[in-house]
Image (spheres, grey):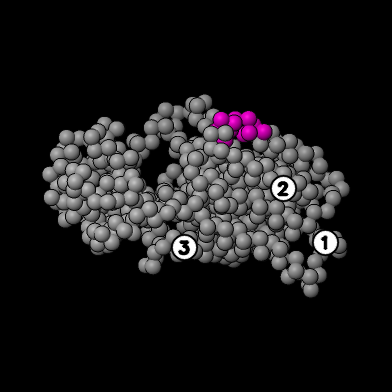
Amino acid sequence: MTTDVQAPAVASHHERPRTSRFPLRLAGPIAAALAAIGMSFWSALNNDVTYALGGIETAGRGGVSVWDVFIARPIAYRLFMTLIDGPAGGEGVTRLGAVLLAAGVAAVLFLGLRRAWNTRVSVFVAAATGLALIVAPPWHFLEPDWVAALLAVLAIGVGLAPRSLWLGALLGGFAAFLAIAVKLATFPLAILALLLLSAFDRRRAAWAAAHTVGFAIIWYAVTRHFLPWETIWLADQAGLVANSPIHHGVEWHNIHRLLVGLGDVMLLSPVVAVAPAAAVALIRRTGRGRPRRTAAVVALLAAGLSLASAYGQGEFFMYHFAAVPVLAAGVWAAAFVLSPAARMPLLVTTVAVTAVSFVLLRRPPEWRHDNVTVITLAFAAAAVLTAIATWLNHGRAARPASATAGALALIAAIVLANLPHAPLAFSGFNHALSNERPADAGYSELRRRIGPDTPVLYLAFGSVNHRLGNPTHCRYPSPQWVQRGTYVRPVRSTRSYADNLRCVTDDQGARYLVWQPGWFSISRSSVEVRTALRHRFDCSPAARLPAPTGIVVCPAR
């Protein structure tokens, strides 16, 4: 196998851990990593994930197959969530399944990196990358963009691990294809995986890219033939993302929003602020001339691809940046082990920005929103100055910085968003929400009152479905198209809207209407929707059942 990344030189005798002390040196980082993972279980699954789970669960209980249900996510992601959710259900079980899967992917990454680097480097990089996935910010975790990042890491691992070039290319290409299948907008992450794979073995990466294209073409043809609604939904969904550059091209407004979003990511995951310095350290150690220029180009392309999905979607929600902390953690770990001269600058800067982020994340939402510009500029300046210092410091005598201290600093820079009461975003959408688990708020009582197996019609966001759990016979368990039709009039002319409308107009055996007025405005819906609901359900104040705050429950007539 040809490799462009060489193993580091053997460390001097005072850096070699003695065999008897090895477990002791690992005790601190292992304990900290386990504590960070345990802390992540304290955080609630975000509403986008419970929306998906609620739709799959309640439609499934109503007899709708995962192949036919609509949750604004492709079939590949729906199948993934069905696998993760499992028959037992429960958020703890779902999270545990994802944690075990991410740990397995990290193990595969280690096996792949071991073919290019020594065990010490491979362990550190794979562990850092896996932990960044497991302890991802709550609004990243289990989103399609997070799953795509997971699959991109898998593509690198399985692409390198087999001795056979052809097997590695086949498996790497398949994993990269899956990173596209879970969400079309995440295709830059598949390219990112292939780019990083090429840094180790260009031939494997080229064949993996060819396999990725082949799998994508086959998947499209099979899906279009056997699941035609998938392509209909995809086309109609694209029309809903009005801010995407696919509609209006490149605009400064969106570039500004991208930079502000990146600032939010740096504050939630401070390792991102130190990643430029880590990348500089890796570039400096490649030597002079063409290798250094190639490394610099790879670094710039990798950074751009990690942000491309967020920019392309044009909404700049935090989970659109899910791959950024994962890439940053891997780059940081590689630089810390491979570049001794960079260890102390990386360590000091990481500790400093993590401490500042911890304080800033505890500020009131209004203060964070009003001061985001100056804070983002300060963090960006720190990132640039640290990168410059790292470049200038290369080759000089380095003060010692232990791997244990580095591991602890990295864990602290990853776990911040999972600490109690941490916000879901620093200043952007959902910045006023935190990661606490929601209280039951009367859903158990409502379920007992109407009966847990009683079919209902939901006019609510899917997280309500997840909390209530009653079955629905509608393939649109959270009726996005009818809901969007209340304020985006062109939606009413789509095939998706017409199909969704049948759930409202046809008698499908629903004995109750579960309505979330804050999400679905009946008064702004079409005459056809209002008439059908009035004929099917009695929503007069006297007929309504006691329900959780923000929910109206109307019996069928």
Mark count: 3
Magenta span: 368-378
Would you say 104 lies left or right of 551 here? right
Tell me residue 400's x, y (percent).
Answer: 83, 53
Q: At label 3, which amino acid type do we have?
A: Gly
Q: Is 318 or 220 nearer to us in this picture?
A: 318
Q: At label 2, which amino acid type do we have?
A: Val
The mark that comes first in sequence, 2 or 3, is 3
The mark that comes first in sequence, 3 or 1, is 1
Tell me residue 45's x, y (percent).
Answer: 46, 54
Q: Residue furthest front?
A: 542
Which residue is drawn at the image coordinates 62% and 47% (left, top)? Answer: 328
Establish if 3 lies above or below 501: below
Would residue 402 be seen by someone viewing this image from the given angle? Answer: yes
| Residues at marks 1 and 2, CA–CA distance in whole angstroms | 22 Å
Q: Is 184 or 40 nearer to us in this picture?
A: 40
- Our reading of the magenta stretch's main secondary structure is helix
Q: Which residue is mark 3?
A: 92
**Depth-wise, is mark 3 or mark 1 nearer the camera?**
3
Residue 293 sits inside the magenta stretch: no
| Residues at marks 2 and 3, CA–CA distance in whole angstroms | 31 Å
Q: Determine the secondary structure under disc 1.
A: helix
Tell me residue 363's x, y (percent).
Answer: 59, 39
Q: Which mark is residue 15?
A: 1
Q: Which residue is mark 2?
A: 351
Q: Residues within 10 Å of mark 2 (few under 14, many from 20)?
A: some
The mark that comes first in sequence, 1 or 2, is 1
Quadrant housing the N terminus:
bottom right
Q: At label 1, which amino acid type do we have?
A: Glu
Q: Residues within 10 Å of mark 3 (few under 14, many from 20)?
A: some
